[in-house]
Image (cartoon, rainbow, N blue to C red):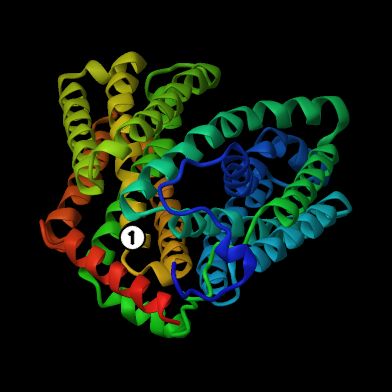
Amino acid sequence: MHGMTGTPAATTTKRPDEPASRLMLLLLVLMNGAAPISLYMLVPALPVLATTFGRDISIAQMTVSLYMVGLACSQILMGPLSDRFGRRPVLLGGLTLMALASVGCIFAETLPQLIVARFLQALGGASGMVISRAIIRDLYSRDRVGGMISLVIAVMMIAQMLSPLVGGVIETGFGWRAVFYVMTAGSIAVAVLIAIALPETRRRGEPGTAGFRGDLVSLFNSRAFFGYVLCQVLASSIIFTFAGGGPYVVVTQMGRSSAEYGAWFATSGFAYLVGNLFCVRFAPHHSLERLIWFGLALQIGGSLLNLVWGVLGYNQLPSWLFGTHMLIMVGNAFVMSNSAAGAISIRPQAAGTASGVMGFLQMGFGSLCSQFGAWLGGHFTTPVPLNIAIAVLSLACAAMMVLLVPRGGVVATEQLIEKAEEEETGLL
């Protein structure tokens, strides 16, 4: 922009709406996937950890549960830091912490030591999750952000779905510590690639000098911000709730094997992947709000249909339960990516803070919903209570959009604010 001052890296960054290069897409996928892939790679080794350290499996499970706590805590911290100091230094610092913590996991002699190291690993690795969304908002206009988030998620999910298999093969062939050797090498490789190839995307004209408190006040004064965030958080809670209750419904209530449950659950991930690919396809041609409402229609329709199947007794077969849940997950992909785009576009200078608040709430509320879903699945003899919970969450998502996001005025208002901020930046 004419008259803009800033670092060379910032001024050479591509303009919004320019197609993403393969290198930039790769960087976004790697930084966004580092923490989730590390989470799922260790899951197959949990029984071995319990046996090796002579502890109950519930204690070994804390290497996963506290890892998720680390993901939540990191996002509320790393997002504001990236607004203040820039995306690159905070991201590199987080990945360095992840690498050091991974080394700590390798040399852990007790299970508590491993749990602490895993928490630190998540604390560092989650920087990529929150900062990747902020970088996308730095580079793209409001109505392109949802499509770009979907593209990154779609590519990342392929690797994420394969990570438990890879972790299991590594543990079987070389032992559980070898899994952390791979994580260490991976985090170092990602950090080096980002240090070499990623420019600073936060323009110096958008410093977010209001600070964390000022950015929070600005965001929390916006009803639309709350609407988008709560819509995204509730949509993600559908995934957590179903994942928590699904195993009990299929294995305990339906009498199927855990392997069969795993195969059926993979259909949910596939449907979510398909939804993100469709979102990438439709994003350039439709507004952010239209895509959210399209996803909400699929979510609500699928969840109500699933509830009807449950009441009629059809959901005692996995094919009925997961068939309609796939429809929910396709819609869920549209809702999550585009509501996230709306939230981080309310105040572009504070995209990191907005992304961090959203990620923190998503992980925190999601963990509670996972436990609630497990309770619903384990304490009833029918999937109907779980079906009701999914339907309520789907309707709640729509309620947030209706009650908190102004229809018709919010888009124009945000675009005027963004234009004024860009003009002000150009005069600096």
Name the foreground residue: 177 vs 192: 192
User: Between residues 99 and 30, which one lies in front from this camera angle?
Assistant: 30
With 22 as the anchor, is 293 left or right in this view? left
Q: Is residue 203 above or below residue 338?
A: below
Quadrant housing the C terminus: bottom left
Q: Nearer the viewer, residue 223 or 249?
A: 223
Q: In this view, which residue lies farthest toward the front?
A: 2
* Residue 180 horizontal/vertical position (percent): 80, 44
Q: Residue at x 79, y 50 (%)?
A: 188
Check the image and report above or below for 366 versus 10.
Answer: above
Q: Quadrant of residue 301?
A: top left
Place of residue 319 in the rendered image (x, y in percent of width and height, measured from the top left): 33, 14
From the image, tell me which residue sits under label 1: 343
The secondary element bearing badge 1 is classed as helix
Q: Position of residue 39 (x, y in %)?
A: 63, 44
Taking the image as shown, residue 396 lies to the left or right of residue 358, namely: left
**What is the three-letter code of the residue carrying label 1?**
Ala
Give me the residue at 27% from left, 39% from top: 390
- The answer to whether one can see residue 359 in this image is yes
How many numbered circles are shown? 1
Q: Is residue 374 visible?
A: no
Across and down, in percent, residue 369 comes to 38, 50
Q: Say which quarter of the image contains residue 303.
A: top left
Q: Residues within 10 Å of mark 1 (few under 14, many from 20)?
A: many
Q: Quadrant of the N terminus?
A: bottom left
Seen from the viewer's position, the closer of residues 394 and 10 is 10
The image quadrant of residue 328 is: top left
